[in-house]
Image (cartoon, rainbow, N blue to C red):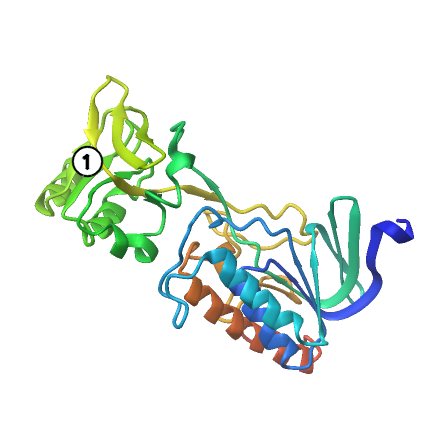
Amino acid sequence: MTKDTQEHAGAQYDVAVVGAGPAGLSAALNLVRAKRTVLLLDANRPRNAATLASHGFLTRDGISPLELRKLGRAEVEQYPEATVAQALVDAVTPEDDGFRVHGAWRGTEVEGTARAVVIATGLREEFPALPSLRAFYGTAVHSCVECDGYEKAGEPLAFVCETPDVVDRALLVASWADDLIVYTNGVAPLDESGRSRLAAAGVRVDERPLADLEGDRTGMTGVRLADGHVEPRTGGFVRPTWHVDLGWVGAPLERDAEGLVVVDRVGRTSVPGIYAVGDVTPPGPEQLIVAAGHGAMTAAAVHRDLVGGLADLRDAVQ
């Protein structure tokens, strides 16, 4: 690295926090308030960037997710113990006295060492292959019904789901919707028991393949099936599949069947000194305020473990 392309090379920190969503920001804030030096790294590519408003976060209901991140980052940055940098982390390597963390952004490399690492990178979403879905995602179509169901109540809605949990998720969406059609796109498995449960809740099911969503700049207007039929719908929900991208972690983290990082009740992973919090841990995607709460809880555990020299791991994953 040359002087113009390196940042923080050789700098030592108590904790590196990778990811600056609500979970990572909350962890970083509580750690710097514990007088821990923190390197906070984030690529600023949040999964909810397309969403115009986030909900359910006490005192911030309706705020833009990007504004919430901006406010949180400013709160962390005001502490002298915090070092915040934009970087896509590509390596966390165990060393004798901790971990070496390396990232890069637009030709600038960021590197430092930390006694502990908090992973708060969230998930990558993969959607059903509908060409116009991304155009309506975050405005007419959402993935989190707890976050956006209230605003959609009373509309004719679609729920597009290709996964085996289609019935349970559809019933949850239906608790906000009076007019709901579930679209399996010919993929999600449905048995007679599932169909009966949905019918009893007043939910219609269409198992035919889909072509696309319809609409224009004013919004979504319908769902077009592969056979050409268009069903009027003004919005809806989609069930993504989620992927955990942690190939950059040079330690064998235990994962569950979904690829999520297995942690104990306060965020300790199977590798001493590495913690995980937020959507990257079971059960996966959660409301922003819940992720922030988990970040604060994990920060307290990191601080206590550092006080004990990272040796007090009685609650660690076995």
The reply, left or right, for residue 213 in relation to residue 107 is left
Q: Position of residue 41 (x, y in %)?
A: 67, 58
Q: Name the residue rendered at 35%, 51% in the picture.
A: 144
Depth check: 59 or 121 in front? 59
Q: Residues within 10 Å of mark 1 (few under 14, many from 20)?
A: few
307 versus 317 height, above or below: below
Residue 58: give x, y in percent of width and height: 38, 71
Q: Nearer the viewer, residue 247 or 26?
A: 26
Residue of label 1: 191
Which residue is at a point 42% across and 67% down the rendered structure image? Answer: 289
Say if residue 303 shows up in the picture. Answer: yes
* The residue positioned farthest toward the front in the image shown: 218
For the residue pair 213 and 246, the one nearer the viewer reads as 213
- Specify the amino acid type for callout 1: Asp
Can residue 318 be seen here? The reply is no
Q: Residue at x 23, y 25 (%)?
A: 208
Taking 39 as reference, is 144 above or below it? above
In screen coordinates, is 51 left or right of 184? right
In which quadrant is the C terminus drawn? bottom right
Name the side, left or right, on which 149 lies relative to 52. Answer: left
Residue 168 x/y as whole percent = 24, 48
Disc 1 is placed on an element classified as loop
Q: How many marks?
A: 1
Residue 229: x %, y % from top left:
20, 21
